[in-house]
Image (cartoon, rainbow, N blue to C red):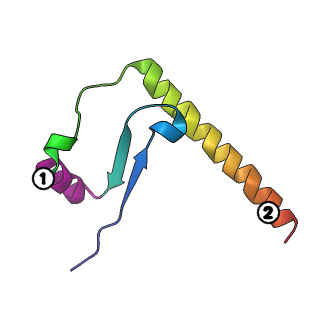
């Protein structure tokens, strides 16, 4: 049996936003949609919320990259 890799990303409290998304194999996403349908909201989000999530993720990536550069500088 092969293992399935997935990642869950949440853009809620820490990012000052709402929602989240799951990245993984198509068959895993199908299973999640089938068994967790009651927990999944399928309404579309307003564009401002999506832009806010995207901007928060970008800031997070940039901040982490800068932090890693500083850590590597002293080790």
Q: What element carries label 1?
A: helix
Q: Residues within 10 Å of mark 2 (few under 14, many from 20)?
A: few
In the depicted view, which residue is nearer to us: 21 or 39?
A: 39
**Mark earlier in primary sequence (2, 1):** 1
Q: Which residue is drawn at 52% across and 32% down?
A: 16
Query: Viewed as shown, does residue 50 lie left or right of 5?
Result: right
Residue 23 lies, in percent from the top left, at: 36, 52
- 27 is within the stretch colored magenta: yes
Q: Residues within 10 Å of mark 1 (few under 14, many from 20)?
A: few
In space, the residues marked 2 and 1 are separated at their CA atoms by 42 Å
Q: On the image, which quarter does residue 19 sit in?
A: top left
Q: On the image, which quarter does residue 27 sit in?
A: bottom left
Residue 72 lies, in percent from the top left, at: 80, 65
Residue for badge 1:
35
* Total marks placed: 2
Residue for badge 2:
71
Q: Quadrant of the N terminus?
A: bottom left
Q: Look at the image and give the residue range highlighted in magenta.
A: 25-34
Q: Establish if 44 lies above or below 21.
A: above
């Amino acid at each position: 049996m092969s293992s399935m890799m997935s990642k869950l990303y949440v853009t809620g409290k820490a990012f000052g936003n709402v929602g989240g998304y799951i990245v993984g194999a198509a068959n895993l996403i199908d299973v999640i949609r089938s068994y967790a349908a009651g927990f999944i909201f399928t309404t579309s989000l307003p564009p401002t919320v999506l832009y806010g999530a995207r901007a928060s993720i970008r800031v997070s990536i940039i901040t982490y990259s800068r932090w890693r550069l500083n850590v590597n500088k002293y080790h």
